[in-house]
Image (cartoon, grey):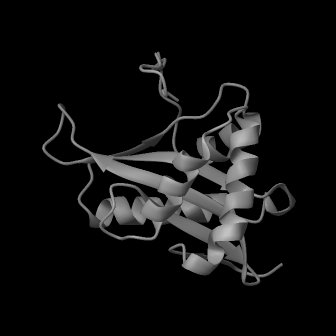
Amino acid sequence: MSEVVIRRPEPGDEATWRRLWAGYCAFYETDLPEAVTDRLWGKLLFPDSDIHGFVATLGGRVVGFVHYLFHASTWSNQPYCYLEDLYVAADTRGSGAGRALIAAVEAEANRRGSRRLYWLTDAGNSRAQALYETITPRTSFIVYRRSLGEAAS
């Protein structure tokens, strides 16, 4: 198998990224408005955006993505980095793409002086957990989430 290459998304990646994004949303059983997807894609193309991303390629083909953002913390003078979305196409899982995407976010978080990198996954996503637990231990925190507003997601 070819080597995994991590890079920033480019305009020519849009169709493939949208297919992967649709797969990610389907996995989490969510149906986002097209305007949300359009906004996200637009933000990923601009380095000064509040949302950032990388894509993973194998043999020149985009096979995965990661999205992340930085935010202030009440517990630190340094920002935290939240890895919000990570997805690798089913036919390339186990290729190292997921691990490489996380490593790229970690490197960027270190470069930007972040105090912490963190992410969440569904309790039933055992395949992702198997990877994540080789990278860092699971915390004991439980997440509570309440949607707000008419268009909350």
Side of 138 relative to 13 (left or right): left
* In the foreground, 106 or 23: 23
- Classify 92 as above or below 137: below
Residue 32 in sight here: yes
Side of 52 relative to 48 (left or right): right
**Quadrant assignment, res 92:** bottom right
| Residue 20 location (% of width, % of height) | 72, 57
| Residue 16 location (% of width, % of height) | 72, 68
Residue at the right extreme, as displayed: 91
- Classify 106 as above or below 86: below
Q: How many marks?
A: 0
The residue sitting at 66% across, 25% down in the picture is: 123
**Quadrant assignment, res 105:** bottom left
Residue at the left extreme, as displayed: 77
* In the foreground, 142 or 89: 89
- Classify 72 as above or below 141: below
The residue sitting at 57% across, 62% down in the picture is: 101
Residue 135 in sight here: no
The residue sitting at 31% across, 50% down in the picture is: 70
| Residue 11 location (% of width, % of height) | 56, 77
Side of 38 relative to 76 (left or right): right
For the N terminus, the image quarter is: bottom right
- Classify 22 as above or below 129: below
| Residue 69 location (% of width, % of height) | 37, 51
